[in-house]
């Protein structure tokens, strides 16, 4: 099988695809997708101009469904755009094309890796990736002003993969983002805060640009 152009394991180098994965693709992964886009907009203006593409899907994705209403409220709290979202079921082509897969839980990570496509070295839970990124010296990464954001992002993923196994979580639960599906808005907001805090160092490391308020 020939992978589509722009896939993560080879192909074009002018784009970098980030794929967020949860279960239904109506709560956690839509929040993470849109908060990532929002953070990239804050730093880069238009993420697409830097070659970054952010998507999401669910291992039991509610194909064609809107995100949960409470997820929209959480995004509004952060000033992020929730419009136009449509749920997707995770497919092989999504994994093939992704340069970085960030999952809500370890089970999601295992499911993505079990799909094959050499996904193991570019698939992490969100919190796992955050922990690894914090340990990487930014000075060892390409300067995006010279080599572009895409090359920096690819180098970051390689560096994080090299650290995995050496920098372990204090507990297994530390790498999990729990599912707020069906929960009240207060729990959704706590999950939104958790996701946002995990994303901030990741987006800073990817782009080499701190959040405007930092």
Image (cartoon, grey):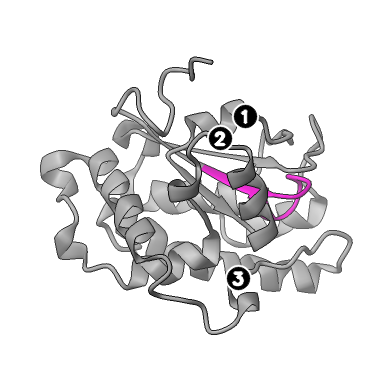
Instruction: Indicate yes or no whether the magenta region holds residue 185.
Output: no
Res 15 visible = yes
Report x, y in % for residue 28: 69, 55
Secondary element at image label 1 = helix
Instruction: Quote the CA–CA distance across marks 2 and 1.
Output: 5 Å
Residue drawn at (31%, 47%), measured in percent from left and top?
A: 153
Secondary element at image label 2 = helix
Q: Which of 171 and 56 is in front in this view?
A: 171
**Extent of the magenta region:** 19-30
Report x, y in % for residue 189: 70, 69
Q: Mark 1 points at which residue?
A: 92
The numbered mark at residue 95 is 2
Quadrant of the image containing the N terminus: top right
Quarter residue 53 falls in: top left
Quarter residue 201 falls in: bottom left
Residue drawn at (80%, 50%), measured in percent from left and top?
A: 68
Q: Nearer the viewer, residue 78 or 157?
A: 157
Mark 3 against mark 1, which lies toward the viewer?
A: 1
Q: Counting other residues with Cα less than 10 Å from the Cα at mark 1, is it few (<14), some (14-19), or many (20 or more)?
A: few
The numbered mark at residue 193 is 3
């Amino acid at each position: 099988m020939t992978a589509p152009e722009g896939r993560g394991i080879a192909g074009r180098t002018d784009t970098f695809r980030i794929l967020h994965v949860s279960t239904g693709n109506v709560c956690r992964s839509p929040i993470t997708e849109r908060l990532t886009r929002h953070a990239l907009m804050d730093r880069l203006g238009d993420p697409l101009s830097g070659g970054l593409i952010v998507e999401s899907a669910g291992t039991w994705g509610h194909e064609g469904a809107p995100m949960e209403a409470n997820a929209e409220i959480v995004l509004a709290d952060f000033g992020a755009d929730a419009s136009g979202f449509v749920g997707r079921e995770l497919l092989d082509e999504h994994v093939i094309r992704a340069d970085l897969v960030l999952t809500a839980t370890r089970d999601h990570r295992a499911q993505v890796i079990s799909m094959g496509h050499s996904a193991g070295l570019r698939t992490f839970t969100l919190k796992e990736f955050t922990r690894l990124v914090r340990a990487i010296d930014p000075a060892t990464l390409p300067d995006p002003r010279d080599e572009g954001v895409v090359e920096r992002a690819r180098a970051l993923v390689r560096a994080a993969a090299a650290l995995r196994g050496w920098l372990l979580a204090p507990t297994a639960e530390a790498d999990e983002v729990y599912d707020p599906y069906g929960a009240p808005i207060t729990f959704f907001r706590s999950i939104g805060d958790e996701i946002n805090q995990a994303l901030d160092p990741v987006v800073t490391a990817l782009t080499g640009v701190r959040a405007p308020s930092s």
